[in-house]
């Protein structure tokens, strides 16, 4: 549970995780194994269609939440179940505590429930009742007085030696560190708890309104014991677990275990309809209660943007693929809920003070969005919460200044041009020797590039191709880095386009795509910059708007329609603009149809880094690899689509994390034996090239366009 008061304290906490070699090793192994297991579990299935069906069904259920609750309550009470509704976490805990008091309960056994973690049930009632977690991982972390580090695998951060030492203390006997033996110890110790507990508390993965049925999805038999052996059973569930029919539940069940752990189905799926037989209960029936928790869910259901959060099936996959979670674990990337969904739910369920540091620890790689079982646009929501936090409190001075600068294109470009002269004392060819520490502390793991002698916009007229009878007319979008730092990348693209008879234009009023200020939570500046760029281009004049920056491409194509949604006067122009945006590799490969015979192919090995916003934001995967193979020998690296650690402002706020991600990426590239690597994003190139320079690695880093232009016949 992260409780740092400010970003400085939070960074200190993160260093603790980075220094934990076992945690790093365990998370690495899991992160590599998980995608393989998931792919096998979904083999032969139309995953995206299934996720879309789940999303639509969950959205429909959220819109009729109150009606479903009323229907569930009526059906369940017909079958001897008492149904309660708690508006807040505290009220839910009090309802369950009162049920226990009325039933004369002294001991409560629990199965795993993130909703009870949300209400902090154990902490609220353990002074009055003995509460025992029975899920193996939950029991372990309860004994250690910790919270879960993962929604599905709460004790993944612990070694078997740590667990053996813990169990030795509990049993007062030295325990072997063999996992099977430790599991037997847990079963032996917990067996007596089931037998002597008067109340069992579970969660519920599904609450079927048409029959008053709850469904439990587990990999251990403890949930069945908890729900059957004690004479009182209480299920605590969020209102978002309500579904109309069993069909809706079973559809979600297709995706939940596959996305969570790579299993086609979990070991136990339990359906409970009504109060079951119980010899010690009143009238031979179990006393059964279901407590539904609101805690802001109904308000969320009415929010046009955040209602999608209620699609979450609590599979934990957003953490499984998160490069930051992989480094630091859930105790540092969560409060109660962890991973990308945790950054959002913390804000709504536990307050802005708990979320203000966490929400910055997103690198915006979009891996979470790409894998979410409910199709939630997690990165967009995280960026929106940053903006909310800025608007609720004092705007950081650097955010305000950057926003003001980017809104004024001429001022922004003037400052970039000034950088060419200001950098002279610290310039070392294409790199800077160092930056003033007051601006960039802890950035020694990479070298920063120097500003180019001449911006691309200043050279464009002299290199603009003279094309007669042009097949296509395109406009180039350069962003800020390729315009003022890496103009050679843009010139390489112009060379290739000219060879294919493409008429090229470069609108001079374009500027930064605005992603940096959006990542910093500066909402108005983001809107202003987006509007400025849309107005800089006349979409009707061009067949395509081509960008060589994956991050810019994703921002222009995917984000601008959302950013400018409240500007109806720009609606048509924004739509036309975004529809024409295309990345360089897709344009060269799919539109121009470049062929291998156009290049002087070499036998040099060239590795590839798949920029996050290309492979996930724009879903472009094979085109860059095919282009590399036309000009050289493509050398496949491990984990090509894992983030390089740049993330724009992320790498400045969290340099320790950025460094680790960069080192892993470069180590994987080195293992291919390639002396050259390419990428489709200048931000990634800045990170990778600067890392190679700082660490002394002999690897040349270039843009895909440069590789092709160099080999062009």
Image (cartoon, rainbow, N blue to C red):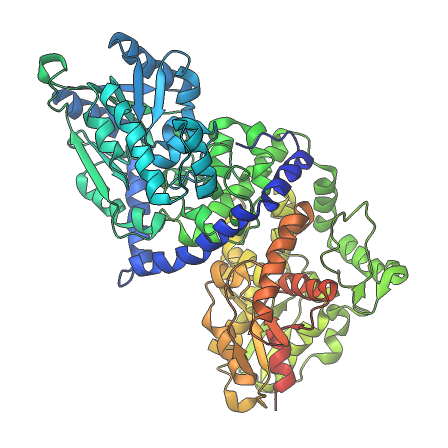
- Residue 383 or residue 354, whichever sits in front: 354
Is 485 above or below relative to 603?
above
Percent of width and height locating residue 235: 27, 25
Residue farthest to the front? 174
- In the rendered image, residue 209, in percent from the top left (x then y), is placed at 20, 31
- Name which quarter of the figure residue 34 lies in: bottom left
Residue situated in front as seen by the camera: 429 or 200: 200
- Residue 505 in percent (x, y) is at 64, 73
Picture coordinates of residue 144, whole percent (x, y): 47, 29
Q: Residue at x 53, y 54 (%)?
A: 365
189 displayed left or right of 683: left
Q: Quadrant where the C terminus lies?
A: bottom right
Answer left or right for 648 relative to 226. Answer: right
**Residue at left 60%, top 76%?**
674
Location of residue 273 with respect to 416 vertically, above or below? above
Front residue of 518/77: it is 77
**Occupied quadrant, residue 653:** top right
Side of 444 relative to 162 (left or right): right
* Residue at horizontal 45 percent and vertical 41 percent from the top: 341
């Amino acid at each position: 549970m992260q409780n740092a008061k400010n970003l400085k304290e939070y960074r200190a906490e993160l260093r603790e995780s980075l220094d934990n070699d076992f945690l790093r090793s365990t998370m690495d192994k899991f992160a590599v194994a998980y995608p393989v297991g998931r792919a096998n579990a979904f083999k032969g299935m139309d995953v995206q269609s299934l996720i879309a069906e789940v999303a639509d069904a969950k959205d429909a259920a959220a819109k009729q939440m109150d009606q479903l609750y009323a229907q569930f309550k009526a059906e369940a009470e017909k079958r001897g179940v008492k149904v309660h509704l708690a508006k807040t976490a505290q009220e839910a805990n009090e309802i369950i505590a009162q049920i226990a008091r009325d039933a004369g309960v002294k001991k409560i056994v629990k199965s795993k429930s993130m909703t009870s973690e949300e209400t902090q049930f154990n902490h609220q009632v353990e002074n009055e009742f003995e509460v025992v977690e029975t899920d193996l991982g939950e029991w372990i972390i309860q004994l250690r007085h910790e919270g879960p580090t993962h929604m599905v695998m709460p004790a993944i951060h612990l070694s078997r030696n740590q667990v053996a030492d813990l169990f030795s203390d509990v049993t007062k006997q030295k325990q072997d560190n063999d996992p099977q033996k430790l599991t037997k110890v847990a079963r032996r110790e917990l067996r007596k708890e089931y037998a002597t507990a008067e109340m069992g508390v579970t969660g519920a993965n599904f609450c079927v309104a048409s029959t008053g049925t709850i469904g439990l999805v587990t990999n251990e038999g403890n949930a069945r014991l908890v729900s059957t052996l004690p004479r009182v059973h209480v299920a605590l569930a969020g209102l978002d677990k309500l579904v109309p029919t069993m069909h809706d539940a079973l559809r979600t069940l297709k995706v939940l275990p596959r996305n969570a752990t790579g299993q086609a189905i979990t070991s136990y799926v339990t359906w409970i309809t009504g109060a079951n037989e119980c010899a010690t209960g009143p009238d031979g029936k179990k006393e059964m209660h279901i407590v539904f928790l609101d805690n802001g869910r109904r308000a969320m259901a009415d929010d046009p943007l955040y209602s999608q959060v209620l699609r979450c099936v609590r599979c934990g996959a957003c953490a499984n693929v998160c490069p930051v979670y992989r480094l630091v674990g859930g105790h540092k990337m969560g409060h109660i809920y962890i991973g990308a969904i945790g950054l959002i739910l913390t804000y709504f369920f536990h307050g802005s003070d708990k979320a203000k540091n966490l929400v910055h620890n997103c690198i915006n790689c979009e891996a979470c969005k790409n894998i979410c079982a409910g199709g939630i646009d997690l990165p967009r929501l995280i960026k929106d919460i940053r903006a909310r936090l800025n608007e609720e409190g004092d705007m950081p001075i650097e955010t305000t200044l950057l926003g003001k600068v980017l809104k004024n294109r001429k001022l922004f470009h003037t400052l970039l041009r000034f950088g060419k002269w200001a950098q002279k004392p610290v310039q070392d060819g294409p790199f800077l020797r160092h930056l003033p520490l007051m601006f960039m502390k802890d950035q020694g793991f990479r070298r920063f590039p120097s500003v180019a002698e001449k911006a691309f916009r200043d050279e464009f007229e002299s290199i603009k191709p003279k094309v007669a009878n042009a097949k296509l007319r395109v406009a180039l979008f350069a962003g800020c880095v390729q315009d003022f730092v890496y103009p050679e990348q843009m010139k390489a693209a112009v060379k290739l386009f000219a060879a294919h008879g493409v008429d090229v234009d470069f609108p001079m009023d374009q500027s930064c795509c605005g992603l940096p200020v959006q990542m910093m939570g500066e909402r108005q500046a983001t809107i202003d910059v987006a509007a400025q760029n849309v107005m800089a281009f006349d979409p009707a004049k061009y067949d395509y708007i081509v960008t060589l920056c994956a991050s810019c491409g994703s921002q222009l194509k995917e984000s601008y329609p959302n950013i400018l949604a409240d500007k109806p006067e720009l609606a048509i122009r924004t739509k036309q603009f975004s529809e024409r945006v295309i990345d360089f590799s897709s344009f060269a490969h799919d539109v121009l149809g470049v062929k291998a015979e156009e290049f002087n192919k070499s036998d040099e090995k060239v590795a590839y880094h798949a920029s996050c916003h290309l492979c996930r934001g724009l879903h472009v995967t094979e085109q860059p690899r095919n282009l590399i193979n036309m000009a050289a020998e493509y050398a496949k690296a491990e984990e090509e689509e894992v983030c390089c650690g740049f993330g724009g402002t992320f790498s400045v706020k969290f340099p320790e994390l950025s460094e680790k991600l960069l080192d892993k990426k470069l180590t994987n590239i080195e293992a291919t034996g390639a002396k050259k690597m390419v990428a489709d994003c200048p931000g990634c190139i800045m990170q990778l090239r600067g890392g190679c320079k700082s660490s002394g690695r002999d690897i040349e880093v270039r843009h895909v366009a440069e590789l092709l232009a160099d080999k062009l016949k």
